[in-house]
Amino acid sequence: MAMASIARRKMTFISRYSGSLTSISRTFASSSSDDNDVVVIGGGPGGYVAAIKAAQLGLKTTCIEKRGTLGGTCLNVGCIPSKALLHSSHMYHEAKHTFANHGVKFSSVEVDLPAMMAQKDKAVSGLTKGVEGLFKKNKVNYVKGYGKFISPSEISVDTIEGGNTVVKGKNIIIATGSDIKSLPGVTIDEKRIVSSTGALALSEIPKKLVVIGGGYIGLEMGSVWARLGSEVTVVEFAPDIVPTMDGEVRKQFKRTLEKQKMKFMLTTKVVSVDTTSDGVKLTLEPAAGGDQSILEADVVLISAGRTPFTSELGLDKIGVETDKMGRIPVNERFATNVPGVYAIGDVIPGPMLAHKAEEDGFACAEFLAGKVGHVDYDLVPGVVYTHPEVASVGKTEEQVKALGVEYRVGKFPMLANSRAKTINDAEGLVKIIAEKETDKVLGVHIMAPNAGELIHEAVLALQYGASSEDIARTCHAHPTMAEALKEAAMATYDKAIHI
């Protein structure tokens, strides 16, 4: 690709306002009385990255965070602790079910849940303190408290110590993330009826766990407790789990989870969820209507999505507009309708993913420093951290069909991958979709061990407009899982070798 073309691509910012794609181009302190160049409300992945980058670019920066620890939902009660439990539970499952196949035998294997939770908490604590260290290193002022607008350039902060301070800034970035979405009439008590937060801190392994919602979070947390011995049932209103996933991959993924003894009730509506003396009772009915049924559980996980956290920030006081979903519309520079006020991450349209928020924060800081920011929402990878993992970037086959583009598909099963066979972990496939006329890769979908790592070769390929032949003619080390991507690329433009 010509360098001029690459430069033009880097100057392009992709925004999703109405569901369509449009190309557009110190030290710590408890308060801050001096004007800042940038004030960031929220210390999650979007907020702390924006604050650090702004400071690195020479802007005087303050970050306000209500939690008292940095990292937001992702680091404290989301991505990081869930991945810790996913790994720990996978280790237990492997020790119990597959180690003997490798000649490693135990007289007994048992779960020490408190120790598992302690390992999770240690990981979270270390990483949150690490972000605080980065704030100190980059001279970002850190205010612990709940911030509300009193003007477009002033934030009133009720500090966690019980006082109040006003933080002033020439530019304010709203990076308050998202909150748990419950169901109408259902009260989450984080004991019997839990959110993902409560599911990360259960004191005992539930005999029966019902997960309401077949998306990323529900399947990951369901996997954790299924591995540890829970009987897990996923209730989903839609006819499919993870509806954004490529259809062919989704079907194989569901079959794999069923092999792991997870049960699914699709096209099913939850009418009510009621606690009883010894558990929870769910009243269900078909999504299209019909006879009701009862499902009992020890614990119910509500995993019905997330909602932007934009209420109680005083946005109405300064006139910042929000849409019917509570999101804040922004322009190509993340600017709201109020001059000097910006928004990033989960509070604006686009995928609610930590890495997307980070990219928003980085680009927004660059814009505020007079540079050019860049985020391409078409190329944000998605990963389900079950085992095997499922990762994707670009378009699904269904989306390509809907666009009327002629295309070719190349697939390669992990069963034919030598590394996967040697470790006896060969469930899954790699699927590549490329434009027929140009061979340009349009989408890559991987179901495999460590798919979340393998996908980034595909992300880079799509970022620079690679063809499937480009991937196929790139030398891959042997034996590696990544060779499956090379073979799938060979199958897309010509023929694979090892199948």
Image (cartoon, rainbow, N blue to C red):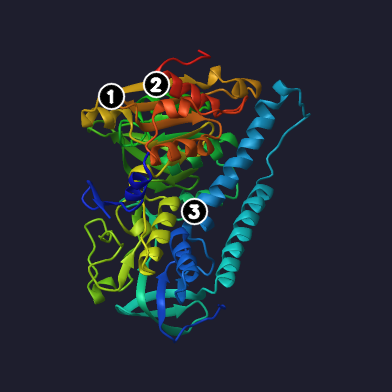
Of tags 2 and 3, which is closer to the observer?
Answer: 2
Tell me the residue that label 2 is attached to: 492
Question: Mark 1 vs mark 2: which is more N-terminal?
Answer: 1
Q: Quadrant of residue 401?
A: top left
**Viewer-nearest of discs 1 and 2:** 1
Of the numbered discs 1 and 3, the one sitting upstream in the chain is 3
Residue carrying label 3: 197
Whole-percent x, y for residue 199 in the image: 51, 48
User: What residue appears at the point 44 percent right and 74 percent down from the top-left corner?
Assistant: 59
Q: Tell me if I can see residue 17 in this picture.
A: yes
- Which amino acid is tagged 2? Thr
Q: Secondary structure at mark 1?
A: loop
Contact between labelled residues 2 and 1, with CB atoms less than 8 Å apart: no
Look at the numbered discs 1 and 3 and tell me whether their residues touch, using CB distance below 8 Å: no
> Callout 1: few (<14), some (14-19), or many (20+) C-alpha neighbours within 10 Å?
few
Question: What kind of element bears circle 2?
Answer: helix
Amino acid type at mark 1: Glu
In depth, the one of 197 and 135 nearer the eye is 135
Above or below for 117 versus 432: below
- Residue 258 visible within the image: no
Which residue position is annotated with label 1? Answer: 437
Q: Is residue 356 above or below residue 477?
A: below
Q: Amino acid at mark 3?
A: Thr
